Every structure is written in structure tokens, then in C-alpha cells.
Amino acid sequence: MVLDLKVVVVGAGFGGIGMGVALKRAGYEDFVILEKGDRVGGVWRENTYPGCDCDVPSHLYSFSFAPYRSAKQRYPGQEQILSYLRQVADDHGLTPHLRLNSALSAATYLDDLARWELTTTDGETIRADVVIFALGQLHRPYIPSIQGRDLFAGPAFHTARWDHHQDLRGRDIAVIGTGSSAVQLLPQIARIAGRVHVYQRTPQWLLPKPAREFGPVSRLALHVPGAHQVYRRALHRGADTLLAPIMHRGWSARPAQWFARAYLHRRVTDPGLRAAVTPDYPIGGKRIIFDNAYYSTLARHNVKLVTDPIQRIVADGVETVDGAHRRADILIYATGFRAAEFMVPISVRGRGGQVLQEQWSDGADAFMGLAVPGYPNAFLIAGPNSFTPAGSNPTMKEYQIGYIMECLRWREEIDAPAIEVGATAMARYRNWLQGAIAKTIWTGSVNSWFKHANGRVVNPWPGTTRSFARMLAHHPADAFTVVPAGTGIASKASADAEQTDRGEGASR
Ligand code: N01
């Protein structure tokens, strides 16, 4: 049996839940949210490693319509974020719309019907007018294929697949990777482990996290009408003013780099360790980490930072290229995610059967990270180049959700079977985007999950959250075009020509 719906949202993290709330508020009832997991929460459901929390303040890392008014912690913990998302879903009546344990495997646009046909891994077929992919980027673990990986005899797992059955007390642990997850994890496990070897390939820039607790006075003050909005706005402005300039080369990043270097010098007194953890690339080249405990943990008697590259993994430990063998009972991969691969493993076919993954083989791109020419009535939340390393990603998603709602309203208003972003608007946006990225430090040689394997910067947004909002403040008719039913295309070139002929405007 085929289920017939108006809208299908894929993913129940911040993007999918926020989209569900917007649909409900606009009076939509005929929609489902497909979720591959057994609960809502996205990355905050997947990541349960000790110490997992958020280094963005809770009053920013939340929806504008659902403030964390009584939060005691300035930075929310993983469980707190998970229960916040569950609460938002409950409060806004999303539970009946959720289809948990239901992973999308394929999405195909049916030209004749101007509708999407969606197939789940358990064989269900759904047809819908509109599909919104809110899959997120940091949920498919990356485990490097280091020689001997399968020979390790003890427990080995990724930070996003934490094995809670393992007792780490007194054990020798190897942690591979020194990104945000490792930095949060290390202080927690070092307290109980026998010995921890941390394998660093590239050092990270760290900045301190301001005080963690909100006192009773601050909490009370945030209940004063309007105070929460003022505080949130101030946090946004602060991030846009202090953090966003770091992404640009030159003087604007210098104060942050001086500050980070001074912090490192204060916290790491051993000259050898200090040299080992000092990055040789500009701050912001990788996502900056906010933390207070990592540097002091590296100096603990039972923790050793290893900077010699890993040669191989053996049954009882890790060997480095200098010939050293370090024993490990447990191996933890803090090696990040397949973040540069968008929409994997879903097979997406647009007009005329064109295949999204083929189009994106050199790196994904999408108009404002939310729409791709040739894929009518399909939208993304947190698609390519819409991750902000300098602010609140739930806020970026809210801006995209607002724009998608405008698209849905416009489509209904003009009674169009389908709309899609025009090739001209996309080309102009792409030109602007590439120009903006060229002015950032991300194009440097340092490795990061911001980039595709070919070096193209595909994840971060090269501006402030305010500039993102400004660019989405245009009417969809400025960028989108109507697609009548039955508009299959023979090739991408003919589609481009056809859309240009229609003379659609551009959004900027
Ligand atoms: O992953 P990462 P993460 N041999 O990709 C190393 C978000 N997050 O899970 O730098 C040896 O940053 C790799 O080395 P190198 C946040 O946006 C947010 O830590 O590539 N090492 C690196 O050190 C974050 O940016 C919060 O040289 C290898 C590490 O593995 C994103 O998630 C909290 C290797 C991977 O670091 C990802 O963070 C946690 C190899 N073969 C996470 N391969 C918040 O608080 C890789 N590495 C919001």
C-alpha cells in the first residue's frame, strides 16, 4: 500500500523538529517525520560519550520559540539537549507525526505526477508533494582504515557509538583524534582510566569557555518579560562580532589567535607539550574548540600525548612510525564524521531521472544550503555551506525553515504543481559563495571536515548568521521557478537553458 501525504520531513534532529513545528503552526496535518533512530534528537541521540556537551550557550543553542529559561548550565549537556528536543516535539503535537525506526533509502521525483516517491529501508512506499531532507552532517562516523584495524583484540568503538558496557576504570586506553569530541571526552576518562594515550595528528586551537553556571539571580532575570530575547540577541551579536571575523584572513582573526595562544601558554607550562599542541595554521582553519579542561588533562601523570604518526594497530595496542608500541585495552576512535558527503546513503533522483549524488561527485552545493535545480519541491535543512562555525546552528536552521515555509505558501498561492530553484539564481549564488569562500582561511592547506576530499569547502557558511538571514529575506519568486507536471529533462544542460529562457530573477 502506498501512503499519500502532502509533506515528508526526513530526520528528527533540530532541523526536522523545527520544520515539524513550523508545519503544525501553519496548519499542516498531512505530514510525517521519518526518523531512522528510535527517538528524536539527531546527533544528540547518537553521541553519548562521557563529557558530551555543547560548547555553544544554551540560550543560543535552542529555538527562538522555545527558550531554555531555567537552564542552570550556560552550556547544555547532551541529555539536556535531548530532553529539550523531546519536549519541543511533545509541546507542539509532533508525536503523532513521527515515524521512528524508519530510514529513507530512496527518493524519486515522478515527473508526470509532480510528486515524490519515497522508499524506506523496511519497504514502505510513500508519495508526497514535498520532501524536506533534514539529515544533519555529523551522524555517520568516520573510522580511518588504519593498517591492522581489525586485529585489535579488545573493545574498539567510535565516540558516536559509545559502548556503555565497557568499564574504563583502571584500563589502558588509546584515543585516536583530538577534535571537539576527544577534547570533551578526555578529561572524563582520564580521571578513571589507568593510562590514556592520545594520538594527535593535527593540534587544534582552543579558547576558554566562560563560567558554566547561571546563578539564581541570572536565572530569575531571564524571566523578566523581554529579557530572554535581549540576552539571546546579545549572544548572537557577540558571536557575529567576535567569532565570525575569525574566518577571514588578516587582522580580524589576530585578536582571537593572540588570545588562544595566551590561553595555551597559561595552561600548558611544559615546553615540549606546549610545542606539540601549538597549531601551525591560523585559528578558525578548523572549527574552534571552547574548553577549560583539555590542556590541564594532557598534563596529568596518566595521560600521554603522542604526535608520532600511527603506523599500525596491533592486537594489544598501537604502533607509531618511530617503532614505539603502546599497549591499549580499549581503543576509542574520536575520528569525526563523514561530514563532507551529503545525503548519503539515500538515492535521490530528480527531474528526468538525474541523480543527485552524481551531480555532487565533486562536492555538494545547494542554493542557500536548501534547494538544488532539477529537484522540484525538495528542500534541505543544513545542506551544503549552511553550517556556521561562529554561532548557533539551530538558528541557521530556523532561517532555512522560515524560507521553506515561504516557498510552500507561495506554491499554494499560485497553485503550482511544483517549484524549484532556477539555474540562474543558483549560478549567481554559486559565484557569490565561491568568492566569499575564497576570502576565508578555510581554503588553506589544513585538513578539516569543512572540505570535500578534493579540497572544496562544502560545509561552512562564509558569513554571519545575520547575513544568512538577510539573504533569505527575499521572496521565493526571486529565485524559484514553476515546474509544470511532466517536465522531465534530457540533460542538465537543456534544463539550464530551459530555465534561463524562462527568465527567472535572482535573489541577489
Ligand atoms: O571530529 P573532528 P569530532 N589518524 O573531525 C583525527 C561537532 N561537535 O567528532 O585533524 C589519526 O573534529 C583528526 O585529525 P586531523 C563539532 O562541530 C560539536 O571531534 O584530521 N587521526 C581529528 O583530530 C565538531 O567540529 C560539539 O589531522 C585521525 C579527529 O580525528 C564536529 O562535531 C561537540 C585520523 C577528528 O576530529 C566533529 O568533531 C562534539 C587518522 N587516520 C562535536 N583520521 C559541540 O560542543 C582522523 N583523525 C557543539
Image (cartoon, rainbow, N blue to C red):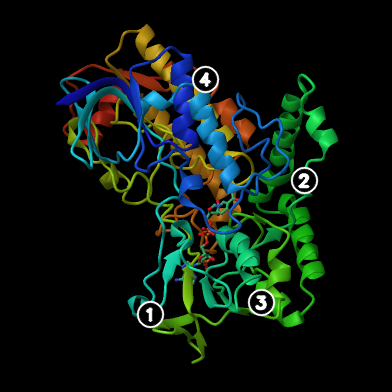
Is 58 on the left-hand or right-hand side of 498? Answer: right
- Front residue (pair 282, 439): 282
Report x, y in % for residue 462: 57, 43
Q: Which residue is mark 1?
A: 153
> Are the residues at dot 3 and dot 1 in contact (C-beta closer than 8 Å)?
no
Residue type (three-letter) at the residue carrying disc 1: Ala
Is 242 on the left-hand or right-hand side of 508? Answer: right
Distance between mark 3 and mark 1 Cα atoms: 30 Å
Q: Residue furthest right?
A: 217
Residue type (three-letter) at the residue carrying disc 2: Glu
Instruction: Relative to 47, say whether 42 is above or below.
Output: above
Q: Earlier in the sequence, mark 4 or mark 3?
A: 3
Report x, y in % for residue 166: 48, 67
Q: Which residue is mark 4?
A: 474
Q: Is mark 1 within 8 Å of ligand 1?
A: no
Distance between mark 4 and mark 2 Cα atoms: 40 Å
Instruction: Relative to 296, say whether 468 is above or below.
Output: above
Q: Which residue is mark 2?
A: 213
Can the viewer see residue 508?
Answer: no
Residue drawn 70% across the image and 37% down it: 71
Q: Which mark is residue 69?
A: none
